Amino acid sequence: MLNLIWPIMIILSIFYSIISGNIESINSSIFNSTEKTVELTLTLFGTICLWNGIVEIASDTKLMIFLNKMISPLINFLFPESKNDDKIKNDISMNIIANMLGIGNAATPLGLKAMKKMQEKNKDKNRLTDDMATFIILNTASIQIIPTTVIAIRMSLGSSNPTKIIFAVWFSTICAAVVGITVTKICIKLKL
């Protein structure tokens, strides 16, 4: 759907700028936005490399074992089909921890790895298991304690207080996770 909406919006914008006589502003905005895009990409690339490195190092430490044990009861409750598979539980917990640190780019490969392992155990390959559906919702809600990617974006755009959004991020991601998991569990119970 977005593949259709964005081209239409771009075409309408260009058409409107030609009619209103603002074609010069399109040219200048194209060059300004490409420059800002390169700067933002480099800033985010550095942040992503840093946090991916930290997650990779932490995955082999006692810290991850401790964090996995801490959230193990939550994972057992949310993912009852996978509670006896330590590899899946480890990938899920690593994904949750990466999301909590606000590094969605590090969480994505971990989430894909967990989904692949859950799909291998799935008897009906054309349908999501209950655990897979729950994982998608939890991963999409992405509870964040430290929204590092958003803070990096705000810093690169010159925000005077890039960390000001932390409480709003906590509230919105926790609410999204609670509502999403609750609705998912209700749908699973009702076999919807």
Image (spheres, grey):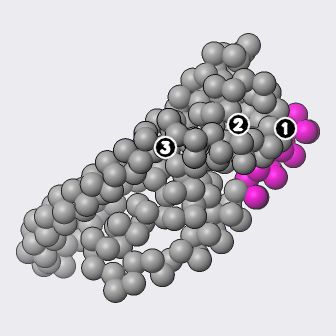
On the image, the x and y values in percent for residue 56 come to 43, 39
Q: Which residue is drawn at 57% across and 56% down?
A: 100
**In the displayed structure, would residue 167 be above or below residue 87?**
below
Residue 49 falls inside the magenta stretch: no
Q: How far apart are marks 1 and 3 (CA)?
A: 34 Å
Kindly state the secondary structure of the residue where label 2 is placed. Answer: helix
Residue furthest to the front: 62
Q: Are marks 2 and 1 in contact (CB under 8 Å)?
A: yes
Q: Do the residues labelled 2 and 3 touch (CB within 8 Å)?
A: no
Q: Residue 58 carries which label?
A: 3
User: Can you tell which of label 2 and label 3 is closer to the viewer?
Assistant: 3
Residue under numbered circle 1: 188
**Apparent side of residue 66 relative to residue 152 in the rendered image (left or right):** right
Q: Which residue is drawn at 13% across and 76% down?
A: 25
- Sooner in the amino-acid sequence: mark 2 or mark 1: 2
Q: How many labels does the image show?
A: 3
Res. 8 visible in picture: no
Q: Which mark is residue 133?
A: 2
**In the displayed structure, would residue 64 be above or below residue 10?**
above
Residue 185 falls inside the magenta stretch: yes
